[in-house]
Amino acid sequence: MNGLLAVAAAFLERMTNPQHGIAVNEEYSFRFHQALAADPEFARSFATLDLAAEDVDSVPVCAWPWYLQWREEHGSPPAEQFLDALFEYTDDPAVRLAVVQSAVYHDYPARASDEDAATRIGGEVQLRGDSDQERERPRPIQSPWVRARTTRPSRAIAPARSREDASELATYLIQLGDPASLETLRALIEEPEWPGRDSLVATVERHIADAGLDPATAAQWRGRLGLTNREERG
Amino acid sequence: MIGGPVDGALNAEIERAVTDGNFPVDVLDVPQGLVPPLVIKYMPAKWGSAYRKSGQQLKISETPGFTWGRATYVAPLAFPLSSGIFGRVGVVARPDGYRYWRTFDARDPYTAGLYVRWLQQQAKYRDIILTAHSAYLSQLYRDAFRQRYQIDCVLFRPDQSNPEYTSIQRDVWMAVTDWRTLSGGQREIASGYSERFIDPRLTVVLEEEFEDEQGGIHRTALLDLGSRPPTNKLAEEIWHAYHSLGDIVRIPS
């Protein structure tokens, strides 16, 4: 267990649990930022905590979405084992959305692992451009967590579970909507070995249909996610 | 997070409603034409005392439960007591660069409806209206909407009140966004301290204290000593006190 988190648990609970009310949440948020301003070393270490799977229950679950978002602004990517454990810990959509966002986010000011750096070219995530040529070129899944979660040998998880995973992941990625998330979604769609791919495509198509988009916008989204090309390729 | 697919026509409607420099500057007007315009933010005494010193910044509200998500919440000085229900200390500051703010004016029902229509197209919309996760998800979506359309400021009517201090029909509250720029040039909503407001200073002290009733929709006055809060010329009085560098305006209960 991470000692700093254990000590901070009660504090974070008062800062992030809406049941305490805005006044209490904000009081603790104010104290937190005062501590950050007064002690840059505390800020740095808290933003780059080495989190393990067993740390998931060391703070109240309501604190994790806040922490993951704050860490995007100030720290390094959490380890994929921790993200996996947190994703499995609860089916709360707010927490799971935060996990997926944290996993695909590519602008952490501090980078923690060589593995993460190895997935990047020139130190930056490579996002596809808008040209036809760029759109055509398949790219691997860049997020280590998404890659690990979806390329585990069809292996450890049953096909039904794989389909559910795919559908849920697609929903979160399309909902996040930023370039890195959509790039990840497109890479998943183009991943040849993943058994959940058909389910993922069906989920994306359903969301596009449910949004009631005009034909031009729907075509734009489908093209952006590689769905048009995929069909054309047969 | 910036949200999923949105119909092209709706997207265009929102873009038309949020254009560069569409901030309605008259909301900051102080009677007698006093310039520069000022805003006021009330907070508990334990934090407000820090604003006796110069060089402070207003804190961005970033915990769940704020009406328009992560932002700095203030009221124009023309509504000097409107947000006094949130604390005894009124900190006054100058908004910086407001003429250029991209503004979402949610006081207008049509404009507010654009957000509702945008929300209805989001994949997790049903989770907001049909599950227990509404508060946090709702905050995420409001942040996503503001980020997607790069909204610097949301103007809205008070959603918490005490009728002696707040008019939900007339008063204006502001949620102002601070941005941080990513390596690729995109901008995300920032946390920490706001750089949107210059020279915040403790300028007003309220005698009254409030607590939530009806889940916070109503803020009950705990003392209610019978003195009606002054309204005539209060904004001007506070404006002059702020510029006198050290004067405090005291408001009886």
Image (cartoon, coloured by chain):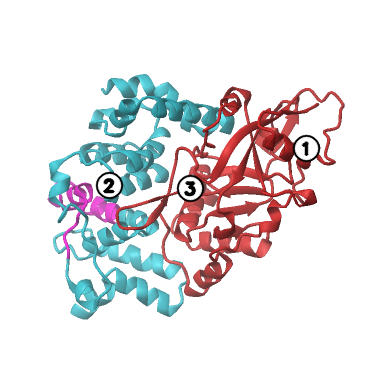
Chain colours: A cyan, B red
The residue at the point 39 percent across, 23 percent down is: A9
B96 or B187: nearer the eye?
B96
B234 or B105: nearer the eye?
B234
A3 or B230: nearer the eye?
B230
The residue at the point 30 percent across, 74 percent down is: A223
> Nearer the N terminus, badge 3 or badge 1?
3
Disc sitting over residue B89 in the figure? none
Q: Which residues are magenta?
A: A139-166
Q: Amino acid at mark 3?
A: Asp
Density class for disc 2 (Cα within 10 Å; few <14, some 14-19, many ≥20) is: many
Disc sitting over residue B237 in the figure? 1
Density class for disc 3 (Cα within 10 Å; few <14, some 14-19, many ≥20) is: many
Mark 3 lies on a secondary structure that is loop
Query: Residue B246: where, in percent of width, then height?
Result: 67, 28
Whether residues under marks 3 and 1 lie with C-beta atoms below 8 angstroms apart, the answer is no
Query: Residue B22: where, in percent of width, then height?
Result: 60, 63
Chain for disc number 2: A
Q: Is A157 part of what is drawn in magenta?
A: yes
Q: Amino acid at mark 1?
A: Glu
Q: Disc 2 and disc 1: Cα gap in Å?
A: 52 Å
Mark 1 lies on a secondary structure that is helix
Q: Nearer the viewer, mark 2 or mark 3?
A: 3
Query: Residue A166: where, in percent of width, then height?
Result: 27, 56
Q: Which residue is mark 3?
A: B178
Q: Are marks 2 and 1 in one subunit?
A: no
Residue ranking furthest to the front:
B244
